[in-house]
Image (cartoon, rainbow, N blue to C red):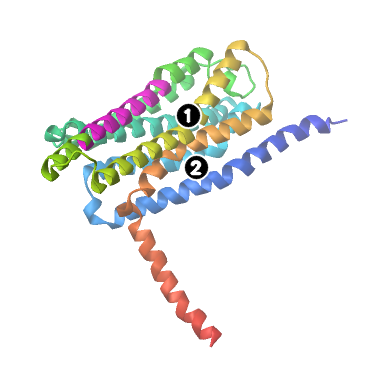
Amino acid sequence: MMDFNNSYVPISEEQLIYIITIPLSATIILANLVIILGISWNRQLHNTPNYFFLSLLVADMCTGVALPFIPLMGLNRHLSFSACLVAHVFPNFLFLAFLFNLVMVHYERYICIVDPLHYSNLWMHRSFPLTLLVVWTPALLYASLPAFGWNNWTGCCSYRRVFPNAFLFLEVYGLVLPAILAIAAMTGHVLWITRGQLKDICRLHRSVERGNQASDQEQKLNLRYTRCVVAVSLTFLACWVPYLIYTHVCIALLISDSKWSSTTHIVLSCIGIGSMAVVPMVLGLANRQYTEPAFKLLQKLRDRWRPRTQASEV
């Protein structure tokens, strides 16, 4: 007689994964498509910095496609060796490519602010195809290492059999965390430079006005800077902290070799990976130039719909 309880558990876990990830994945894909079309339709945005951002959006959209498959890595599945490698290596490659593209975009904009005089001579601008190779190729090479023998394959498909502990430790503490810290450091330095420039502007404004008290204009500038700091901080907390918590929980349980609730693992993985994939959406939707074509299209559809509704009411 078949054990229906054991056969039912993987189905319920997969259903939970799809319930959480499919709406999030669809949102990520659609939002990235809107921004990609907005950049493609606006010829004024056809320049190297926006090409870098397009590469990030493509990587983020691919991450959204692979999002439902990432929590499935924590389940034991009966797959062949080649199918198991594809199911684990390909989502990991897309995730690393997304992370490296994110670092590249932050670095390019960081140099634009820190060293604007040499910005146009940056090596990334002189050879855009080479920059794409530098970003995408290392992600593919590292993610493919299990296919070249660095694995613990014993016949059962799971992330513990495909990715050895040393591979996971190297990826987390050698690639992922340094990339996140680099992004945080560049963002913090930009905010520090902005604060210094704001003080200089306020000092010049006071010297022109010949007053010692802060004017309304200075208060507005300080308020804008405060809002910017709050927005950056909340974005970092909302997008990166869940992923960092998920990563360190997984590493701690991997070291202790203890089992934990599959439901907890699914929820943490979905929230952690999904929150991190939202970062390019926040950067893109915050730029009106990227979203202007979509707003114009919606406005045209709304204007066409109004006469029809008014005619039907009459």
Indicate the amino acid at tag 2: Val
Q: Is residue 113 left or right of residue 264?
A: left
How many numbered callouts? Answer: 2
Compare residues 108 and 51 and report the one nearer the observer: 108
Helix, strand or loop: magenta stretch: helix
Q: Position of residue 15 (x, y in %)?
A: 68, 40
Contact (Cβ within 8 Å) of mark 1 with mark 2? no
Indicate the amino acid at tag 1: Asn
Q: Residue at x 53, y 15 (%)?
A: 164
**Residue to which mark 1 is pinned:** 92
Q: Please tell me whether residue 106 belongs to the stretch shown in magenta.
A: no
User: Which numbered dot is residue 78?
Assistant: none
Q: Is mark 1 on a helix, strand or loop?
A: helix
| Precedes in sequence: disc 1 or disc 2 | 2
User: Considering only vertical position in the picture, is 297 above or below 258?
Assistant: below
Picture quadrant where residue 118 is located: top left
Q: Position of residue 131 (x, y in %)?
A: 25, 32
Q: Is mark 2 on a helix, strand or loop?
A: helix
Q: Position of residue 79 (x, y in %)?
A: 62, 29
Q: Position of residue 40 (x, y in %)?
A: 30, 53
Q: Residue at x 33, y 55 (%)?
A: 38
Magenta stretch: give its range. 176-198
**Residue to which mark 2 is pinned:** 65
| Alpha carbons under labels 1 and 2: distance apart | 12 Å
Q: In which quadrant of the rendered image does the N terminus lie?
A: top right
Callout 2: few (<14), some (14-19), or many (20+) C-alpha neighbours within 10 Å? some
Callout 1: few (<14), some (14-19), or many (20+) C-alpha neighbours within 10 Å? many
Q: Is residue 45 left or right of residue 57?
A: left
Q: Residue at x 41, y 34 (%)?
A: 233
